[in-house]
Amino acid sequence: MNANTAEAVFTQVEQLSTAEQDRFFVLIARRTFAENKPTYTHNEIFGELTRTPFTASDAAEYLEISMATLRRIIKSGKLTPVSQVGRSCLYGIENLREIKHQRRH
């Protein structure tokens, strides 16, 4: 028996085209929220995302800003990476939430 880990499945999903990723998540949503299924908490469904760092482009999309604006925020010191993989910086959701909250007020 070949058991998949969450990390292995996530890696496989990342390798799919955007259209296939969309279809995959629609399928999950349909099956998860279909009748006769137990109710899942937000954390059970999306909890892993709180521990997954964002790439710069994902961070800009989350903040609903351009990459140029994101670079200015980083340069100002308001956003610092939580880790770095090669030349790519990764940003934590808590920092991004704080910045998003500040930008709205």
Image (cartoon, rainbow, N blue to C red):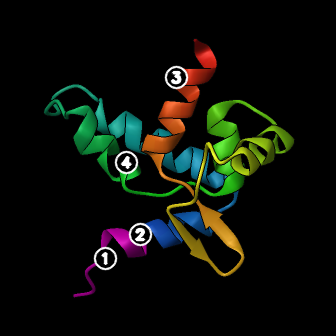
Helix, strand or loop for the magenta stretch, by majority: loop
Q: Residues within 10 Å of mark 3 (few under 14, many from 20)?
A: few
Marks 1 and 3: in contact by CB < 8 Å? no
Q: Disc number at residue 50?
A: 4
Position of residue 94 relative to residue 35, above or below, is below
The amino acid beneath tag 4 is: Thr
How far from the left and from the top, in percent, is residue 98? 49, 32
Q: Which residue is mark 3?
A: 101
Q: Give the Cα separation between the discs numbered 2 and 4.
A: 18 Å
Residue 59 position by quadrant = top right
Residue 40, percent across and down? 19, 34
At 16% across and 29% down in the image, what residue appears?
39
Q: Earlier in the sequence, mark 1 or mark 2?
A: 1
Assess whether mark 3 and mark 2 are in contact (beta carbons under 8 angstroms).
no
Segment tinted magenta in the rendering: 1-8
Query: Residue 73's quadrant in the figure?
Result: top right
Work out how far the residue at label 3 is from the one at label 4, CA to CA, in angstroms: 16 Å
Distance Cα–Cα, label 3 vs label 1: 37 Å
Report the residue that reaches farthest toward the front: 76
Instruction: Name the residue tied to disc 1.
Output: 4
- The outermost residue toward the bottom is 1
Please tell me whether mark 3 or mark 1 is closer to you in this view: 3
* Mark nearer the N terminus (4 vs 1): 1
State which tag comes first along the sequence, 3 or 4: 4
Q: Is residue 23 above or below residue 65?
A: below
Q: Secondary structure at mark 3?
A: helix
